[in-house]
Image (spheres, grey):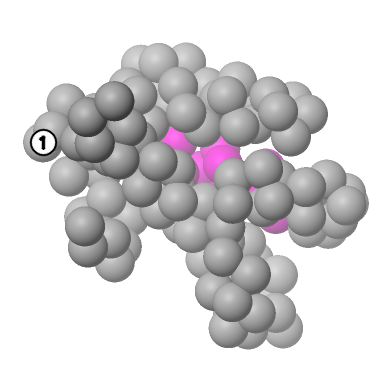
Amino acid sequence: MSLPSNFKDLIAEAEGLNLYKKLIIQLNKDLLYANIDLELDHETLPTSLKLVLHETVFHLIQSKFSEYLNLLYIVDVSELKIKKLDGNDTLQLSEEVTFLILQREWQKVWYKNNIPS
């Protein structure tokens, strides 16, 4: 599996495989495990998903850093990928982390759908 390299490709692939709703479900599950007060409606539009998740990640980085780290742990975002990001601009950092979260969640959904149990 090659991971999508941007948000647009990720959403196109998820919608093309009819897995967008499962992506939302997986994200909600991990947000709940991480004790983040955010539940996305299954009908959330991709642009709203990106915006709301980005705002949440930005807020966590600025105000609740330990919860932010816990979310990364629960979602299982690669520590190496996080370390490669430039942390000088919090807004840019939160946008890139948002994509890494969605990318990892997409990977989980894709594997669950394509690997026989």
Report the magenta stretch's main SS: helix
Residue flagged by tag 1: what amino acid is it?
Answer: Gly
Measured from the top left, where is residue 87 in percent x and y? 70, 79
Measured from the top left, where is residue 110 in percent x and y? 28, 39
Magenta span has 51? yes
Measured from the top left, where is residue 32 in percent x and y? 68, 24
In the picture shown, does residue 76 fall above or below 21?
below
Q: Which residue is pictured at 50% across the width and 43% down the height?
A: 51
Relative to 3, is 101 on the left or the right? right
Question: Which residue is label 1 attached to?
Answer: 16
In the picture shown, does residue 104 fall above or below 15?
below
Q: Is residue 95 visible?
A: no
Q: Nearer the viewer, residue 28 or 113?
A: 113
Relative to 20, is 70 on the left or the right? right
Q: Which residue is pictured at 61% across the width and 32% down the height?
A: 30
Q: Which residue is pictured at 46% across the width and 57% down the height?
A: 99
Q: Residues within 10 Å of mark 1 (few under 14, many from 20)?
A: few
